[in-house]
Structures are given as structure tokens and as C-alpha cells.
Image (cartoon, grey):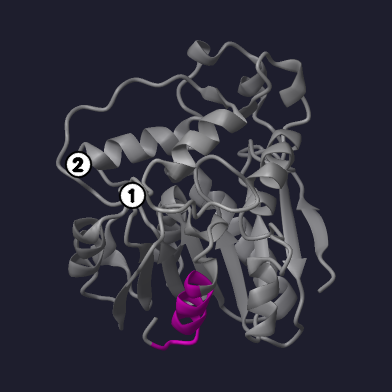
Amino acid sequence: MTQQTFRLPATDRRPSLLVRRQPRPGAPAVLYVHGATFPSALSVGFDFGDGSWLDDWNTRGFDAWAFDFAGFGESGRYAEMSEPADRHPPLGRASEAVQQVTDVVASIRRETGRPVSLVAHSWGSAPAALATIAAPETIDRLVLFAPIARRAGGRPASLPAWVDVTDAAQHARFVEDVPAGHPPVLIGFDRWAPAYLASDPVAADRAPPAVRIPNGPRADNMEAWAGRLPWDPARLTRPVAIVRGAWDSLCRDGDAAMILDAATAAPSRHDRRLEAGTHLMHLETGRRSLYEAVGRALKGEQP
């Protein structure tokens, strides 16, 4: 499918936002909300040789959309990202990023005239859920892929405004949950890594090369694990489904239960635990089972 891109102009509250679409006019719209460390082109838009997740949504009968949060990928950067990191608090917290989701949803609704389903990964579950709670009439259903939940932990550390992340650091994080002795499940990293570094125009100027990203998502995750989730599942009034990998240490059985047990106002609640997958299952050999489960959830079926 031919991908279209356009840009929502900067406002006094945020930089400009890159929005991508693989259109299927007249079909239900689905918007992907990415996680804490890499943008939409490296997640839902990445083609492993047999198509991307956006392609899969088109095939299943959806009008497929995604965007990059401010500070990521092809969206504009916060001015504070060019200043010393310790001069400002973490950038891009969920309480602010929710407006970016809302702005993109409003743009899609102007184009399509119908509610939008959200598929949110990891930290992206927080701004996506906040947007759903704030304007439920604009959202058809909410599908959370490996969401971050509230845990009873210690006090979160103080973080700077931004952080630089190397491709080596990403690789280490991507494979850490695979059981010892199991064959690798991460695929295409030899192509993914240079594309990741290219997502930041000045990554190559750093030693070692690294992508600069806002630290707000990491701060939100740490606060959630210290007992302060930035959204309240009890306020969800749209159908909600969780899909996650069995090896995912960031979204465990208790995490999924925490969210769904509290979401008593949601018309339907589902949880699907997929075998042989980590927190990054959309980049792994098992991604097709993830696509299938999410596709079923988007159609209101048991994932």
C-alpha cells in the first residue's frame, strides 16, 4: 500500500507532528500510538520483508494511521533537547502527550468522519488511555499492546529532560527477556539499527552514535512502578483489550489484571497472553500472532 505522510503544525503547546497513513478510504480507522524509545516508522511501519503492521491492518480492512510523538522520529524536537539535559525536567510526560494523541485523532476524524480505534504500545498506553477517557465519543475501542501498569515499588529516581540511546543499548533491551538457551526471536536488527540511528538527524554526530529522545515516558513508567499510574482504568468507558507476550517482564500477568480488574466501566474487557514473545513482540518472529490477536480485538472479537 502507498503510504502518505503529512504534518500537523506546531502549536504553543507542542512541536509539529509527523502523521503517516496507509489509506483504505471508507474503512474503520486505526491509530498506532508508539512507546517510549522509538517512533512509528521503526515499529508499526517497519517492513521486515513481508510487509509492515500497517500493511496488515490494510489487509484486515482498516484505514491505518500512525504518528511520531514530539521529540521522536520525523516530528519536531522540543527546544529543550538542544540544551543540557539536567537543566529541565523530563520532556513529553503522558499528561502533556495526551494532547498530541487528541490532536491526531481530531485530524483523522476530520478526514474520515468516524471514531478512531487506538492501538498503543507500552508507555503509549498512558496517553492513549488518557485521550480515551477525556473524549470517549471519539474512540471506538482501545487495544493495549504490552501496557505499563501500576505496581507497588519504591520511589522513582529524578530524571533529566532527555537521554541519548545507542543501537547497542536497544539491542540489549530487546533480547533481555528471551529465556536462556532459546533461539533468537528478534529479527531484522541489522536493518532496524541503522534506520533507528537515522531517525535522529544528528545521531551520527554523537560518540557513540545515539538517538536523543524525551525522558518523560521513562519518568512516567518509573512512577507507575512506584505506585502512581498517570491514568485511571476505572474511568475507561470504551471496550478495552490487552495483548502481550508471555516473556514480557514489563507487562506481566499481574499488570494486565491490575488494569482490567479496575476497568469495570468498560463495555468489554479482554486479555490475551501470546507464547514466545517479549515486550518487543512486533519486532520478533511471533509478530504474526500479535497481528492476528490485535486484529481480532479491533473487530470486537476475543483476541
Q: Residues within 10 Å of mark 2 (few under 14, many from 20)?
A: some
* Dominant secondary structure (helix, strand or loop) of the stretch shown in magenta: helix
* SS for callout 1: loop
Q: Quadrant of the C terminus?
A: bottom left
Q: Is residue 26 above or below residue 115?
A: below
**Res. 213 in view:** no
Gap in Å between the C-alphas at discs 1 and 2?
A: 28 Å
Q: Is residue 128 above or below residue 15?
A: below
Q: Which residue is mark 1?
A: 179
Q: Which residue is mark 2?
A: 227
Is residue 298 part of the magenta span, yes or no? yes
**Res. 290 in view:** yes
Q: Which mark is residue 210?
A: none
Q: Is residue 140 left or right of residue 220?
A: right
- Where residue 2 appears, as percent x and y from the top left, is 85, 70
Quadrant of the image occupied by residue 79: top right
Q: Is residue 281 left or right of residue 258?
A: right
Residue in the image at 31% along x and 35% along y: 222
In the foreground, 300 or 192? 192
Quadrant of the image occupied by residue 203: top right
Residue in the image at 73% along x and 37% along y: 194
- Where residue 42 appears, as percent x and y from the top left, is 65, 50
Q: Is residue 103 above or below residue 166?
A: below
Q: Is residue 118 above or below residue 29?
A: above
Identify residue type, mark 2: Gly
Residue in the image at 63% along x and 36% along y: 71
- Where residue 94 appears, as percent x and y from the top left, is 44, 44
In the foreground, 70 or 153? 153
Q: Mark 1 against mark 2, which lies toward the viewer?
A: 1
Q: How many marks?
A: 2
Indicate which disc, 1 or 2, sits on the residue closer to the N terminus: 1
Q: Which residues are magenta?
A: 289-301
